[in-house]
Amino acid sequence: WTRITSGIAASEFTRVVREDPTRAGLLYAGTERGVWVSFDDGAHWQRLQKNLPPVPVHDLALKEGDLIAATHGRGFWILDDLSTLRQYAAGLTEREFHLYTPRDAYRTTFGGFFFGPGGAGGPAAATGLPPLSGWDGAVINYWLKKPGQKVMLEFLDAKGQLIRRFASEQDSTARADSLRQADERASRDSVNRRKADSLAALGVLPAAIRSDTSDTRVPVGGWRYTPPPRAPARAGMNRFSWNLRAEDAQGFTGMIFWAGGTFGPVIPPGTYTVRVTAGEQSETQTFHVLKDPRGNATQADLDAQYSFAIQVRDKTTEANNAVRTIRNLKAQLADRRAKAGNRAAPLEKLASSLEAQLSSVEEEIYQVKNRSGQDPLNYPIRLNNQLAALAGVVASAEARPTAQTYEVFKLLSAQLDTQLKRLNELLSSGLAGVNAELTRLGLEKITPSTAELQR
């Protein structure tokens, strides 16, 4: 007999030892105070405690790449994803960067027509939260020797086409949104301070409580840009969870939908690649997305579902970008009118006509009367919401889209194309007259954009 207790505290006796089924020499031990791991058949041990309380571990089990500990008095504990332990080798921690091979992930969707992508009960995985046991997400692990590097994660399909990209740095849209929110808060603060000063001057509001009148917590209703989860860039081990969704559809601030949202579709089963770039170094690894074993859809069914969902997403983006463009133009028109001052009479006539026609198009694409989540009960949803709701119908089951969904998409697309044609005509003819008058007045021309501007 040979003792293999080197490293385990002398005050702890071992209750269970388990061998990893995929890596020879990798052992796990449950003791009177916790869990230990050995990479060399028990010659040396080290703690695998993390946030596990110091509690007797009576049994250990390995299932689908997870380690389950049965404890005395504290129930079951699960260490998700043993990929890093199974792939660990001496010298890895001396490297500047290393990408571990991800384990396979299951393609699952939890939700339906109303609670589907972006609905009232949208999937938690959309927030970037870690999935459980490979369900509803792919977990990417990588090692960084130095913190604070620029990290980029890119997910590609079997053809090498980019599906999704995540970065450690804040994206430009999130930065712009943060600045806009800061401006909104500053504007509210300024208005509230003026109100407080006026009330205090009248003796209605004591000066002592004037500083409490600034409410910076007033929420903006409806859709607001939610930046994608950022890739961690800490020194040591880093973990990122991808919810297996393609890029989201575009939205616009304050947009209110009923039974629909902007979440991108879930990718179909298949072989995928993750490419992680840290500083100047880049590594790739492949992994598989597996079909939900509870369903009976074929690969062809799920490929068709994804392909159609992408079409619906792109059409929803077209609709929402049209609304963004219209609102951008209106904001620019308001700005030029203000700058024209008392010279604005000819400009006012042209701008009013253009704005009215733009509003007509906008009202066909989006229900502009919506101010709260319950308003769609009173006002019928428009084209962009109908398209988004169709995406929820398509994603409500593991199945090929029905003939009816294709027919509805064809109908909605034709209606949207009609409005987009009207918008393009306004951008070429109606806007030309306005810009000609702006040039005469020595003011900057209006350039269409999807950027969100304050009016």
Image: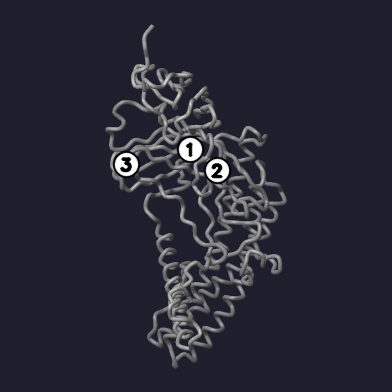
Q: Which residue is mark 1?
A: 272
Asked if the residue under mark 3 is in contact with the one under mark 1, i.e. CB atoms within 8 Å, the reply is no
Q: Residues within 10 Å of mark 3 (few under 14, many from 20)?
A: some
Foreground of the two, 89 or 296? 89
- Is the C-beta separation of discs 2 and 1 under 8 Å? yes
Q: Quadrant of residue 373?
A: bottom right
**Three-letter residue code for mark 3:** Ala
Whole-angstrom CA distance, mark 2 to mark 3, is 31 Å
Query: Residue placed at 49% from the left, 75% from the top?
Result: 329
Q: Earlier in the sequence, mark 2 or mark 1?
A: 2
Q: Which residue is nearer to you in this view: 131 or 406?
A: 131
- Residue 52 x %, y %: 46, 33
Amino acid under label 1?
Tyr
Q: Residue at x 66, y 47 (%)?
A: 396
Front tag of 1 and 3? 3
Q: Viewed as shown, does residue 38 lie left or right of 416?
A: left
Q: Which amino acid, mark 2?
A: Ile
Task: Name the one closer to the observer, 310 or 62.
Answer: 62
Say which of marks 2 and 3 sits in front: 3
Residue 252 in percent (x, y) is at 53, 64
In this picture, residue 383 sits left or right of residue 250: right
The residue labelled by disc 2 is 267
- Report whether residue 443 is seen: yes
Count how many numbered circles sit on residues in the image: 3
Where is 301 relative to 416, above or below?
above
